[in-house]
Image: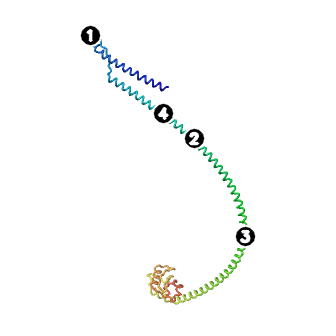
Amino acid sequence: MKQRIIEIVHFSKSAMFTIVVHGILIAALLVGLWWPYSENKAKRGSVKPIQAQVISAKEMTKQVDLQKKKLEDEKKAKEELEKLKLKQEEEKKLEQLEVERKKKEKEKQEQEEQKKREEKKKKEETLKKEQAEKKKLEAEKKKKAEEKKKADEKKKKEEALKKEQAEKKKKAEQEKKRKEAEERKKAEEALKKQLEAEQAARVQADAANAMSALVDRIAAAVENNWRRPLNSRSGLKATIRVKVSRNGDVLSANVVKSSGDSFFDQSAELAVKKASPLPFPADPKYYEHINEFDLLFNPDDF
């Protein structure tokens, strides 16, 4: 109803404006006709002229066009408003439909969930019952298995005891034999070591004797190659450790007990090295016993 009233008001304004415009046009025409006559009358009667402003037909048309455009713009705005209103109503209907759809979906989902819960509960009860039955059967089976296991274990223990006793007896006999064999072996090894030690002692003694027989020759060889250092006092002596090859070549000669005079010690080492090869026993079995020996270097005894 309110919208209808607005439309009537708009229509009345438009009609009124049209009437006013036409009235102005008619007035303008009348003024145009009256104006020459009034000028002539003024000239004749010296009457003061009336000032008036005439609106041209072009300006009036422009005003009419502007008013029409304004009405058209209002009409378009009204149409846009109507469209917007219809769109909002449609959106509202769609929202309501969406709400109803979601509500139905939620109800359906709740029903399905309820159904699932009931089915789950039913399955759980069935499963619980099956598990109870299974547990009972397993308990009976376990009991029988334990009884059988105990019987088997008892039998195994008896057999194991017999076997253990037989093993102990066998091990005792083997241990006795092993100890007897070990004692025989120890006795044989001890005898062998004793014989080897006696043999080594004999060879070592022979090697020492053979080396002792060559001491004078070794001393003479060293003396012939020794040169007394300048300002060397008498009474000096040093112990030199000599290592030789199988044919008597001197491999090393180092002072192990100094004379207190470094020049004297160096001359002694040099004399031993220059005397290489030294007289040495020819029998190869003596070598490992006398391949390294200490030589007392005492020039006063030369």
Of the two numbered discs 3 and 2 on the same chain, state the one appearing first in sequence: 2
The residue that appears at 44% across and 31% down in the rendered structure is: 79
**How far, Cα to Cα, is label 1 from label 3?**
167 Å
Q: Which mark is residue 86?
A: 4
**How far, Cα to Cα, is label 3 from label 4?**
98 Å
Of the two numbered discs 3 and 4 on the same chain, state the one appearing first in sequence: 4
Q: Is residue 207 above or below residue 37?
A: below
Question: Callout 1: 10 Å neighbours few (<14), some, many (20+)?
Answer: few
Relative to residue 122, is residue 48 drawn left or right?
left
Q: Is residue 152 above or below residue 214?
A: above
Question: Callout 2: 10 Å neighbours few (<14), some, many (20+)?
Answer: few
Asked if disc 4 and disc 1 are in contact, CB closer than 8 Å, the reply is no
Residue named by callout 1: 44
Residue named by callout 2: 104
* Callout in the foreground (3, 2): 2
Q: Inspect the image, locate mark 1, and give the three-letter code of the amino acid beneath it.
A: Arg
Residue 28 in the image: state x and y as whole percent. Answer: 33, 18
Residue named by callout 3: 155
